[in-house]
Image (cartoon, rainbow, N blue to C red):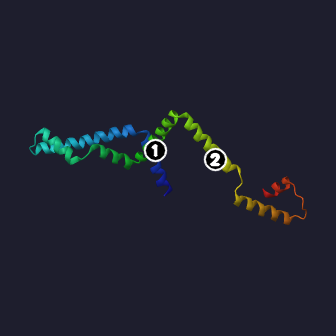
Amino acid sequence: MTMDFLRVAFRRVKALFSGEILDRDMDKEMRVHLDLLVEEYECAGMSPEEARRAASRRFGNLLRIKERGRDIRGAGILEDILRDALYAVRNLRRTPAFTSTVVLTLAIGIGANTSRPHKPSQEILHKFFLSFRSQNSSSCLSARSMLITWK
């Protein structure tokens, strides 16, 4: 299961970086199939123009077939994400005031949420210190002694 996932992930990343080579191979293969259909129709007695038109009609939309091939090999999703990320970066570079406002707002929001202790963690620490305090007879504990026993 894990190996299959890793194998598929590796193929998708490889397809992302070698997409032009795979596209050229797919173009060549589709051209060969189309030429074979044309040849078949010409042998059936059609003129070259009619054979080409009939073969194109039977073969289907080449762009749609290419897109399906990209989706099947898994690069379509990654290419879309990469293309969207590049588009977002281009738009953010065009509006530096908006970009800085967004980045500053996110930084303040993330910083504020990570710096304040959450209620569940406060309760856990409070229970820990109460149990530690009840185990020891002395009521005055140093932070160092609590950390040593906590480790």
Which residue carries the number 2 mark? 109
The residue drawn where x is 37% and y is 45% is 70
The residue drawn where x is 20% and y is 44% is 56
Query: Which quadrant holds the C terminus?
Result: bottom right
The residue drawn where x is 58% and y is 41% is 102
Judging from the image, what secondary structure is the residue with disc 1 in?
helix
Q: How far apart are marks 1 and 2 (CA)?
A: 26 Å
Q: Is residue 47 left or right of residue 105?
A: left
The residue drawn where x is 90% and y is 62% is 139
Q: In this view, does 45 lie to the left or right of 89?
A: left
- Label pair 1/2, CB-CB below 8 angstroms: no
Residue type indicated by callout 2? Gly
- From what the image shows, is residue 40 above or below residue 145? above
Residue type indicated by callout 1? Ile
**Residue 4 at what x, y percent from top left?**
46, 54
Task: Quadrant for residue 42, please give it.
Answer: top left
**Residue 46 at what x, y percent from top left?**
10, 43
**Residue 131 at what x, y percent from top left?**
81, 65
Total marks shown come to 2
- The local crowd at label 1, few if under 14, some if 14 to 19, many if 20 or more residues have their Cα within 10 Å, is few
Q: Nearer the viewer, residue 71 or 17?
A: 71
Judging from the image, what secondary structure is the residue with disc 2 in?
helix
Farthest-out residue, left: 45
Q: Which of 106 and 126 is in front in this view?
A: 106
**Residue 128 at what x, y percent from top left?**
78, 62
Q: Nearer the viewer, residue 77 or 89?
A: 89
Mark seen at residue 81: 1
Going from N to C along the chain, the mark reached first, 1 or 2, is: 1
Mark seen at residue 39: none
- The local crowd at label 2, few if under 14, some if 14 to 19, many if 20 or more residues have their Cα within 10 Å, is few
Eye-nearest disc, 1 or 2: 2
